[in-house]
Image (cartoon, grey):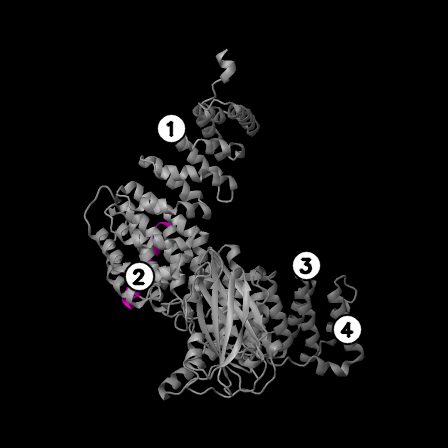
């Protein structure tokens, strides 16, 4: 009779786990789960609450296995008011697993949380703090913030630590409440308990990320953080906090991360940190991963703050030692860090170039990828021969998925840093034969442009290509055959005669051998349509280059007039008509191609460097300009064909401009970041308007708005002055901060552009603070303004690139 009223005793959690693990199939496991869920539902309907805690615990276990558990949400919350600690513990665990801030039912537990936060038992209060810190919504944290603040003042270190961690959630959900916690941070930071200090550092870090005002306020804590870090590295053995011989590495890492935030773009704060960072870098044990983690954070901090040059060299040397570590993860981290550092301290990273090249022999694909990218970043005019030689050797043995990127990288490095034209051609031909069909499509026209521009090397390059193509291993390499076909069509007359080359006489190639080779390409089943088109074009050009081949050429061309390849058939028919009916036009139609106008990058850069040196020596201003290149074709749509503007006066052009057009086309130039910090008020435009009332008032515009990123243009212009000042203000509406922010712009060729350094590279979230940058445009011809934008940044760990165009400039900016 008793069992009929209360029901059978439910299965214990350990028995349920044993039954589930005993299942041999997924279907059998689902059967056990479904049966147990039915019994648990019946138990929830019963008025007897004796076994509610046990049933909720079983539901939570099944939820962690991936089964639905929504039916137990209310039952979980019913455990919170219980006076039994076991019920509360399971209840709060269920709340943190089954509920989130978007569930309206969550508001029902606010009263229980408030009561438990005031409970005499530290364990009950800590349960409430953990739950609030995990799933508390904005409404809940507003209601319970006073209780959290009260517990932060508690003398109990256990409760104090939990309350500080809960305050991190409060600050994250409702940033304006951080004013309640800022006065408490200094006292908590000086607490003797390491857990309290660690939680406080986390809270300060969160505050700095949420508010630029808090960031400025917290910089006064830098001496305190330095003192704590110094005590940690100088203290003796402490069994309570020792990890592999290092005192509390968790607190050290957290402090280093906070110092990195506080010292960024701040020279005074960075100066205070320099000595302690040097001590950490030299006194930390490197034989264990614990020490390596601290050294890694130290390196990141040194690179992000305004540290001394010697300290930066020390940081790079630490990364160099990481490259020699046997742990693959440490080597990967070192390569990633060096890749970030190479943009700011190239010379220090160059000292470890040999070690980086050795990483190209590593069997791990991830390390190979990072080492390859770093090697390309380290190439310069001095080491290009040795580095490219190693990269070509790597190209021959690397996995297939790397060959395309490696070949393209070598082509770009050779184009930018080649010591002479012959070496450049030899390198590209070597890559062409080594990479084979993994070479990207844009490489063929690039190599053709290079060969066209090398008058004295036509015979040498064509003969080298011809000898390489005769190798049976290269018979199916389409890029090689395409370039060779073009060269034979253009320079067959030179190749037949032979010509002196750098290393001696190039052996001539017979006419019949050339024709037979091109015919073999057409007939080969391994040649694709593009290659065959190159070949038939070359055969047609031979009719005007070489004598005595008309019959053979006509036979070959007519033979493809009925092929099933439409492109090839059309070329054959048209060429046949040209040969048969318009022979007198062949000489003009098939004359040699004119030289392609493709500037060599390294020559332009050398000219720029020479101009800069001369300007410095003569103390003359430099004229801002956009470098002319084939990339200018992309701006033809906005080319207004206005006369070339005159140079800006020295008073208006304060510093050399940077070539942003190359960046918009994928270059590696990055805008510099200064130490001005993040502007939170009194923007540059407002200051200028106040200082100079004669500046004409021009309405601003929204230049770009996407994905929570908003860019606003403000304008200033003196009456009658052709120079327009554009004040760029960038804000972030996302809940997460934007880092590595770079804003770049390009104008038509007829205008002059100068971009000053931005106020920072981090845009704080929730529209707190802005990043400012000033652009000066010289427009003496008063043409209508059009601008293309390129914005790169990192959000939530993802690198994002956005492109845009601004055409709606107010008429007052250019008239």
Q: CA distance from mark 3 to mark 2?
A: 71 Å
N-terminal of the two: label 1 or label 2? 1
Residue found at x 33% / y 64% = 305
The disc placed on residue 428 is none
Residue 697 is covered by the magenta coloring: no
Report the residue marked by disc 4: 574
Between label 1 and label 4, give the one nearer the viewer: 1
Report the residue marked by disc 1: 84
N-terminal of the two: label 1 or label 3? 1
Report the residue marked by disc 2: 219
Where is 575 relative to 364, above or below? Answer: below
N-terminal of the two: label 4 or label 2? 2
Q: CA distance from mark 1 to mark 4?
A: 95 Å
Taking 88 as reference, is 501 left or right? right
Q: CA distance from mark 1 to mark 3?
A: 82 Å
Between label 1 and label 3, give the one nearer the viewer: 1
Mark 3 falls on what kind of element?
loop
Mark 4 falls on what kind of element?
helix
The disc placed on residue 525 is 3
Between label 4 and label 2, give the one nearer the viewer: 2
Pick the front one: 597 or 32: 32
Q: CA distance from mark 4 to mark 2?
A: 77 Å
Q: Position of residue 276 (x, y in %)?
A: 24, 59
> What segment is highlighted magenta in the picture?
307-328
Q: Position of residue 598 (x, y in %)?
A: 56, 77
Q: Residue 769: name its quadrant.
A: bottom left
Residue 670 seen in the figure: no
Pick the front one: 233 or 736: 736
């Amino acid at each position: 009779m008793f069992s009929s009223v209360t029901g059978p005793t439910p299965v214990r959690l350990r028995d349920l786990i044993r039954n589930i693990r005993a299942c041999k199939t997924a279907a059998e496991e689902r059967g056990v789960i479904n049966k147990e869920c039915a019994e648990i539902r019946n138990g929830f309907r019963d008025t007897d609450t004796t076994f509610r805690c046990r049933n909720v615990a079983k539901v939570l276990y099944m939820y962690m296995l991936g089964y639905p558990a929504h039916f137990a949400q209310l039952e979980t919350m019913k455990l919170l008011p219980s006076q039994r600690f076991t019920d509360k513990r399971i209840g709060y665990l269920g709340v943190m697993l089954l509920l989130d801030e978007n569930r309206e039912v969550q508001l029902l537990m606010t009263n229980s949380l408030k009561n438990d936060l005031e409970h005499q038992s530290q364990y009950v209060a800590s349960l409430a703090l953990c739950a609030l810190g995990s799933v508390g919504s904005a409404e809940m944290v507003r209601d319970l913030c006073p209780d959290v603040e009260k517990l932060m003042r508690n003398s109990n270190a256990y409760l104090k630590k939990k309350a500080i961690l809960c305050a991190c959630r409060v600050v994250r959900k409702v940033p304006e409440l951080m004013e309640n916690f800022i006065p408490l941070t200094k006292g908590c930071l000086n607490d003797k308990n390491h857990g309290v200090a660690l939680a406080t550092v986390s809270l300060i870090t969160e505050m700095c990320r949420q508010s630029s005002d808090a960031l400025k306020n917290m910089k006064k804590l830098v001496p305190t953080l330095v003192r704590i870090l110094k005590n940690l590295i100088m203290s003796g053995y402490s069994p309570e906090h020792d990890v592999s011989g290092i005192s509390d590495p968790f607190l050290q890492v957290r402090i280093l991360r906070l110092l990195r935030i506080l010292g960024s773009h701040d020279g005074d704060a960075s100066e205070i940190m320099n000595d302690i960072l040097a001590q950490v870098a030299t006194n930390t044990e490197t034989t264990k991963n614990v020490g390596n983690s601290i050294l890694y954070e130290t390196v990141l901090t040194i690179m992000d703050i305004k540290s001394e040059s010697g300290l930066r060299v020390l940081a790079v040397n630490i990364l160099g030692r990481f490259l020699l570590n046997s742990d693959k993860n440490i080597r990967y981290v070192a390569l990633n860090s060096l890749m970030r550092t190479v943009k700011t301290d190239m010379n220090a990273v160059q000292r470890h170039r040999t070690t980086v090249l050795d990483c190209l022999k590593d069997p791990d694909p991830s390390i190979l990828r990072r080492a390859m990218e770093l090697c390309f970043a380290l190439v310069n005019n001095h080491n290009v021969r040795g580095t490219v030689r190693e990269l070509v050797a790597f190209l021959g043995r690397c996995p297939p998925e790397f060959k395309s990127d490696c070949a393209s990288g070598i082509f770009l490095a050779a184009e930018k840093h080649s010591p002479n034209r012959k070496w450049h051609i030899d390198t590209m031909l070597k890559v062409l034969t080594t990479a084979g069909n993994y070479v990207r499509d844009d490489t063929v026209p690039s190599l053709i442009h290079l060969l066209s521009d090398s008058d004295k090397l036509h015979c040498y390059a064509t003969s080298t290509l011809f000898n390489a193509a005769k190798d049976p291993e290269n018979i199916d390499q389409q890029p090689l055959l395409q370039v060779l076909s073009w060269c034979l069509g253009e320079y067959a007359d030179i190749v037949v005669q032979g010509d002196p080359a750098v290393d001696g006489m190039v052996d001539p190639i017979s006419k019949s051998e050339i024709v037979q080779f091109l015919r073999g390409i057409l007939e080969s089943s391994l040649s694709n349509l593009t290659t065959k088109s190159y070949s038939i074009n070359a055969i047609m050009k031979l009719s005007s280059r070489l004598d005595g081949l008309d019959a053979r050429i006509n036979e070959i061309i007519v033979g493809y007039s009925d092929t099933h390849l439409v492109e090839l058939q059309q070329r054959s028919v048209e060429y046949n008509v040209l040969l048969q009916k318009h022979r007198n036009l062949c000489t003009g139609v098939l004359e040699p191609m004119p030289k392609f106008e493709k500037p060599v990058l390294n020559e332009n850069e050398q000219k720029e460097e020479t101009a800069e040196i001369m300007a410095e020596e003569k103390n003359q201003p430099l004229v801002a300009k956009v470098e002319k290149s084939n990339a200018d074709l992309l701006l033809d749509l906005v080319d207004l064909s206005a006369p070339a503007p005159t140079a800006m006066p020295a008073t208006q052009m304060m510093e050399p401009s940077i070539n942003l057009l190359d960046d918009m086309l994928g270059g590696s130039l990055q805008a510099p970041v200064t130490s001005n910090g993040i502007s939170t008020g009194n923007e540059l435009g407002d200051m200028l308007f106040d200082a100079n009332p004669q500046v004409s008032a021009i309405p601003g515009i929204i230049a770009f708005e996407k994905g929570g990123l908003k860019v606003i243009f403000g304008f200033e212009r003196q009456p009658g002055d052709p120079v327009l000042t554009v004040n760029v203000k960038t804000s972030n509406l996302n809940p997460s901060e934007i880092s590595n922010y770079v804003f770049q712009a390009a104008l038509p060729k007829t205008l002059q552009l100068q971009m000053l350094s931005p106020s920072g590279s981090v845009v704080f979230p929730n529209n707190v603070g802005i990043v400012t940058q000033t652009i000066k445009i010289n427009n003496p011809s008063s043409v209508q303004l059009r601008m293309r934008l390129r914005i790169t940044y990192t959000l939530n760990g993802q690198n994002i690139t956005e492109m845009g165009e601004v055409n709606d400039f107010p008429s007052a900016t250019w008239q």
